């Protein structure tokens, strides 16, 4: 395997880890940036083709070291009030380091004028990359199917999960399909200057998700639609910082307005495979809810 010229940030997170495994399985060398050498970092290091370096978005020097010799970078971090600055600083360092292409994990409907703070910060970072002159590919996924794992405890303990999605349809997507598109953008030509909306193959309501989960588990699971104030309180009790909790309320209001229902052809067009539907997701994940 040749020396890595691809950097994966957010490598210990859900998409980053999946992307690292997919690149490794394809025999493609990559470097993973991690904050600390913990068990997740050691698991990454054990993948064939992986190099692991420490780097923190809050420490430009460490990011500059992580980017030495890198041509293409996958940019991802979790959402916080610091993310816009962290990702913007990353772009400055990448420019100095001679990075040629940034594949940024954004979100469906990223928009500077959105009432959803996550969509505004993603749009601001996209604009920063666009004006930097570095080649870009923006990956804009819809709600992750794996997000249902966040409701694992109430599903197991009460047979219920709670949100504010109403009866809106959402074309939610499996993160393995997002990672597959990221892998292609990082390793094959023709993706510079492209914006990819990434969704699953069908649009489902949360009540339909509950029905499918009930069938997969063989016991009734109910979706309970709650008021935004109730969800905010629950998120605060669960320890979410207020910026993130309020952002999730805004995000779910966007879903409830039916604004994330459209199905995109991107996964099929780029990978040649239909994106996984929710039944396929459940086949692989149902044991985690049992
Ligand atoms: N959830 C959804 O349904 C959804 C839908 C569309 C878009 N998105 C977007 O998806 C992204 C989140 O993806 P994900 O679920 O894969 O994230 P995740 O699992 O929360 O992982 C976040 C990663 O960022 C790393 N990180 C955080 N702060 C860092 C820092 N200061 N320096 C270096 N690394 C840092 C974390 O490292 P540690 O392990 O050290 O913490 C971790 O590897 C967000 O941009 C969100 O807007 C989410």
Image: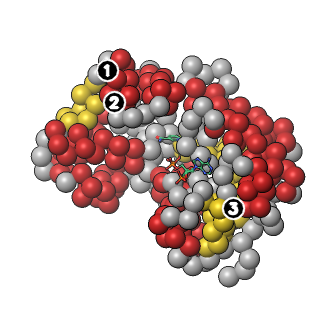
Badge 2 element:
helix
* C-beta proximity under 8 Å, tags 1 and 2: no
- 137 or 160: which is nearer to us? 160
Q: Quadrant of the N terminus?
A: bottom right
Q: If you read the primary sequence from the N terminus, does the residue marked by circle 2 or circle 3 appear first? A: 3
Q: Which numbered disc, 1 or 3, marks the residue that appears first in the sequence? A: 3
**Circle number at residue 7:** 3
Query: Where is mark 1, residue-wise?
Result: 230
Distance, label 1 to label 2, CA atoms, is 11 Å
Residue 184, can we see it?
no
Q: Residues within 10 Å of mark 2 (few under 14, many from 20)?
A: few
Q: How many badges with numbers are in the image?
A: 3
- Determine which quarter of the picture holds residue 157: top left
Residue 233: x and y in percent read 34, 23
Question: Is the CB atom of the residue marked by disc 1 within 8 angstroms of ligand 1's nearest atom?
Answer: no
Q: Is residue 146 left or right of residue 77?
A: left
Tell us which disc is closer to us: 2 or 3.
Answer: 2
């Amino acid at each position: 395997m040749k020396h890595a010229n691809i950097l994966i940030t957010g490598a210990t997170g859900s998409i980053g880890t999946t992307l690292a495994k997919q690149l490794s399985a394809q025999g493609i060398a990559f470097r993973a940036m991690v904050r600390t050498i913990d068990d997740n970092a050691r698991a990454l290091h054990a993948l064939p083709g992986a190099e692991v370096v420490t780097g923190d978005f809050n420490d430009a020097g460490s990011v500059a070291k992580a980017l030495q010799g890198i041509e293409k970078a996958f940019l991802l971090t979790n959402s916080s009030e610091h993310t816009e600055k962290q990702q913007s600083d990353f772009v400055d360092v990448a420019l100095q380091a001679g990075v040629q292409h940034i594949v940024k994990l954004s979100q469906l409907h990223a928009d500077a004028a959105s009432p959803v703070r996550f969509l505004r910060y993603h749009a601001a970072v996209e604009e920063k990359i666009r004006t930097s002159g570095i080649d870009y590919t923006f990956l804009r996924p819809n709600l992750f199917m794996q997000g249902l794992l966040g409701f694992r405890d109430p599903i197991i303990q009460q047979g219920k999960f709670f949100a504010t999605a109403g009866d809106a349809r959402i074309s939610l997507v499996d993160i393995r399909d997002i990672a597959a598109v990221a892998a292609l953008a990082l390793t094959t030509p023709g993706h510079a200057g492209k914006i990819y909306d990434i969704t699953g193959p069908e649009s489902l309501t949360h009540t339909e998700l509950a029905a499918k989960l009930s069938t997969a588990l063989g016991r009734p699971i109910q979706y309970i639609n709650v008021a935004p104030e109730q969800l905010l309180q629950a998120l605060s009790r669960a320890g979410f910082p207020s910026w993130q909790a309020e952002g999730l309320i805004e995000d779910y209001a966007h879903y409830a307005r039916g604004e994330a229902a459209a199905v995109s052809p991107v996964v099929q067009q780029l990978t040649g495979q239909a994106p996984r539907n929710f039944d396929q997701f459940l086949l692989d994940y149902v044991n985690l809810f049992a």
